Image: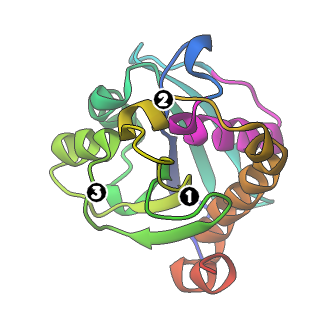
């Protein structure tokens, strides 16, 4: 059980601006938008000036959470996230990062603590800024690019029309997984969502 006084940071990875909003790389933003809706809040600029945040609680009198949407591009998210974490005095072990994952099929989720970057520039930037990769991850599967499509082109492209029909379910599941991770712990979350 989580201490209701502890603050958790929930970081949704993505790229800022409307031209990126439907891209596979922006699943973290989409999940954080859903969580913001559940908390009844809207993103606003943080004092650091490099991220937008929503503050709230998961349940009553549940743990405090700060949803973070960095305003920087994926390969530079570490600095803004570190600034927000320092402001709220949140250590890496109370940070949950939501990101896209190539090695997991679309529509599938995995949660874990720590691990490698697997070529993900957002994770690399976070590891570089924090000096560790020991934070929680909610990994939303996007699958591998079809044929010979380059990975960079694939992650920076919109979901297919078939995927867009399923996307709301994946977003909902990922938001549920974040809440479960914070309130019930990793093992329970993995039992429920790592299928």
Quadrant where the N terminus sits is: bottom right
Using the rendered image of the protein, determine whether residue 98 is visible from the camera's viewpoint.
no
Under circle 2, the secondary element is loop
Per the image, the residue denoted by label 2 is 156
The picture quadrant where one finds residue 67 is: top right
Say which residue appears at 65% left-offset and 27% top-offset: 22
**Magenta stretch holds residue 90:** no
Q: Of marks 1 and 3, which one's residue comes earlier in the chain?
A: 3
Q: Give the percent coordinates (x, y) of residue 121.
A: 29, 39
Q: From the image, give the main secondary structure of the stretch colored magenta.
A: helix
The residue that appears at 45% across and 19% down in the rendered structure is 71
Mark toward the start of the polypeptide (3 vs 2): 3
Q: CA distance from mark 1 to mark 3?
A: 13 Å
Q: Report x, y in % for residue 157.
A: 55, 29
Is 140 situated above or below 147? Answer: below
Lateral position of residue 36 relative to residue 46, left or right: right
Residue that badge 1 annotates? 141
Residue appearing at x 68%, y 60% in the figure: 107
Magenta region, residue range: 23-43
Q: Which quadrant of the view contains residue 105?
A: bottom right
Q: Residue furthest front?
A: 147
The part of the image, by quadrant, that contains residue 169 is bottom right
Disc 3: which residue? 118
Density class for disc 3 (Cα within 10 Å; few <14, some 14-19, many ≥20) is few
Among the two numbered marks 2 and 1 on one chain, the one whose residue lies closer to the N terminus: 1
Tell me the residue at 69%/81% (across/down).
Answer: 192
């Amino acid at each position: 059980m989580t201490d209701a006084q502890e603050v958790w940071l929930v970081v949704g990875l993505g790229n800022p601006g409307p031209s990126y909003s439907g891209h596979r790389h922006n699943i973290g933003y989409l999940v954080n938008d859903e969580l913001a809706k559940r908390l009844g809040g809207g993103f606003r600029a943080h004092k650091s000036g490099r991220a937008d945040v929503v503050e709230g609680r998961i349940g009553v009198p549940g743990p405090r959470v700060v949803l973070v949407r960095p305003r920087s591009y994926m390969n530079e998210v570490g600095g803004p996230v570190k600034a927000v974490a320092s402001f709220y005095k949140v250590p890496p072990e109370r940070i949950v990062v939501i990101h896209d994952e190539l090695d997991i099929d679309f529509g599938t989720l995995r949660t874990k603590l720590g691990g490698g970057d697997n070529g993900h520039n957002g994770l690399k930037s976070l590891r570089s800024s924090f000096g560790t990769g020991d934070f929680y991850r909610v990994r939303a599967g996007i699958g591998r690019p079809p044929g010979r499509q380059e990975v960079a082109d694939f992650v920076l492209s919109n979901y297919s029309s078939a995927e867009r029909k399923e996307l709301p379910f994946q977003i909902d599941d990922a938001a549920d997984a974040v809440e479960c991770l914070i309130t019930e712990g990793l093992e329970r979350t993995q039992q429920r969502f790592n299928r």
